[in-house]
Amino acid sequence: MFRRAFLSGLFYRRGLPLVDNNAAVRRFYRRMERAVVRCVPWESKLTISFTLDGSHKHMLRDQTEELGKVLARISNSIIKARGKGKKAKASKAGEAAADVSEEPVVRLYFNGDFVSEDSLNSDAWQDGAELQVGETRYKIERNPPTFTTAELPASLLAGFPVCPKLEVEFGDLKDSTFTWYKESSPNAHAPGQDGCWVEAGNERVFIPSNLDIGLRLKLKCTPGNESRYGVAKELVSPGTVEAGPGVCTFDNRHMYTKKVTDASTVRVVSYNILADIYAQTELSKTVLYPYCAPYALELDYRQSLIKKELSGYNADIICLQEVDKGAFSDSLSPALDAFGMDGVFRIKEKQHEGLATFYRRSKFKLIGQHDIMLSEALMKDAVHSMLLEKVSSNPTLKEKVVQRSTTLQVTVLQSLSDPSKTVCVGNTHLYWHPKGGNVRLIQMAVALKHLKQVSEEHPGTLLFCGDFNSTPSSGLFQLLSQGSLPEDHSDWASNGPEELIQMELLSPFQLTSACGEPAYTNYVGGFHGCLDYIFMEPEALQVEQVIPLPSHQEVTTYQALPSVSHPSDHIALVCDLNWK
């Protein structure tokens, strides 16, 4: 904020007052346009953006440059533009071009004073200042709320939420305004024609109906903060609203999750959402999921279903696996943010997908992140030295373990209603191979040690979610649910004697599977079984309800998963847990 004493060094009063009987002044006050200046202390440049004679100007200048150089640049650009226009007209008329060298008035004012041209840009372009360019006057808005990203999704389905990707600087989306429009009739939209739009909604998220099929959508969004609004943006959808798939596998499940739970309950979701990099392979299309319609494997289509499914659960904590990096930043994060959730992402090394954990910001705050790559932790963290020594006794097994990029995402959340309640949320996706039970046991041994370390640093309760690629009959499930695994368990020899080691494993936690042992959480053409779990500590939490999984008829309507009505080959686990 400028103080008057400081301003006196930058501004000086004209000898003659600006009064209404001056014709030039009346012309000066005829129009007031908007000029936006972005100037932040951590950058050496500032930007000045305004529209002049129908042309958008965007100037990038040094903050330490003198104001006079910027004003001269604006003046010269006007003279140059006018010269080109005069020459073009004269050429058409066969006449000589008129002299256009007269310099336009370009000045900057603040509180009625001229700003000294030797002022530095960083000091001169203040909020509320006025720029005169010829007979046009601009009100300077310094660092107003501004959308740095504003995009509509490519896929629009009737009955499914349309969640724009929006990022705002110097503002907050909760203080911004949104107005949705739809075409008055199919193909009514044409550039420059505003009469073809009909207002349809005023929320951040819009859900088109079947009546909107074949119509484009438009969003007018205005960024804001607690004190003002910035420049509005208008976004027109690249395509039209298409028909949705009708009834989806999760629609009946949403009947149990219509409202957000109260402070005594935590609703948890764990879901492998099938990464696009796996869904789009030739193997997936011809061998793994040949029964699935090709369009239903497309990322945009599946993301529309995933966003509706997740938003309808009204969850407090969501753990996702196989999350494409782009899907997190461009789709899931903007969508779930609109529904009150913040998220963190951990990509797998050497992969384009990873793990995401979302939490309801009205109920939790993030107080810690302790993610690790399991193989790296095994090799480098001294706490795993005894395990590493045992694994190193079999070089073949060690090499297989070390090559894996399997990751453990650990997110520590604190309850806002009761800060004494802390939740350590583990999220993982273990090695996939059917004969990899021995590798998964080693990965789990590393994970449990790490989770114990984190829980000692942040005392509270543990939620351990993910795709463990292990059935209830596995040694891994026995280790987690019973607390120990004997050295002679058959899973140590899951891939034959060449990878065999024998060791007893102990869990530092007493855990139970909150959703029990479903018949299956993964259902594809060649396999179905329970691979996904939400493990909890029963001494701190108790199960209030487990949201029923889709019926077998729903799952197999289109033979198997994924399908036009279900976006993944896995099924989400959803449960409500009460604090004890």
Image (cartoon, rainbow, N blue to C red):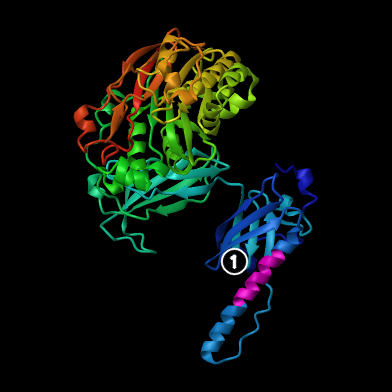
Q: Residue 334: x, y in percent? A: 45, 40
Quadrant in the rendering for residue 30:
bottom right
Picture layout, residue 44 above or below residue 452: below
**Residue at the spot x=65%, y=83% of the render?**
99
Q: Main secondary structure of the magenta part?
A: helix
**Residue 455 vs residue 398, the one in the foreground:** 398
In which quadrant will I find the N terminus?
top right
Q: Is residue 415 visible?
A: no
Q: Residue 203: x, y in percent? A: 38, 40
- Callout 1, which amino acid? Arg
251 left or right, relative to 222: left
Q: Residue 72: x, y in percent? A: 71, 67
Quadrant in the rendering for residue 52:
bottom right
Residue sitting farthest toward the bottom: 94
Picture layout, residue 289 above or below residue 264: below
**Residue at the spot x=25%, y=57% of the render?**
185
Q: Residue 447: x, y in percent? A: 52, 21
- Is 78 in the magenta? yes
265 left or right, relative to 380: left
132 left or right, relative to 296: right
- Is 271 in the magenta? no
Q: How busy is the neighbourhood of tag 1: few (under 14 within 10 Å), some, or many (20 plus)?
A: some
Mark 1: secondary structure: helix
**Residue 16 vs residue 462, the one in the foreground:** 462
65 left or right, relative to 161: right
Picture layout, residue 74 above or below residue 283: below
**Residue range corresponding to the magenta coloring:** 71-82
Residue topped by disc 1: 27
Picture layout, residue 519 above or below residue 26: above
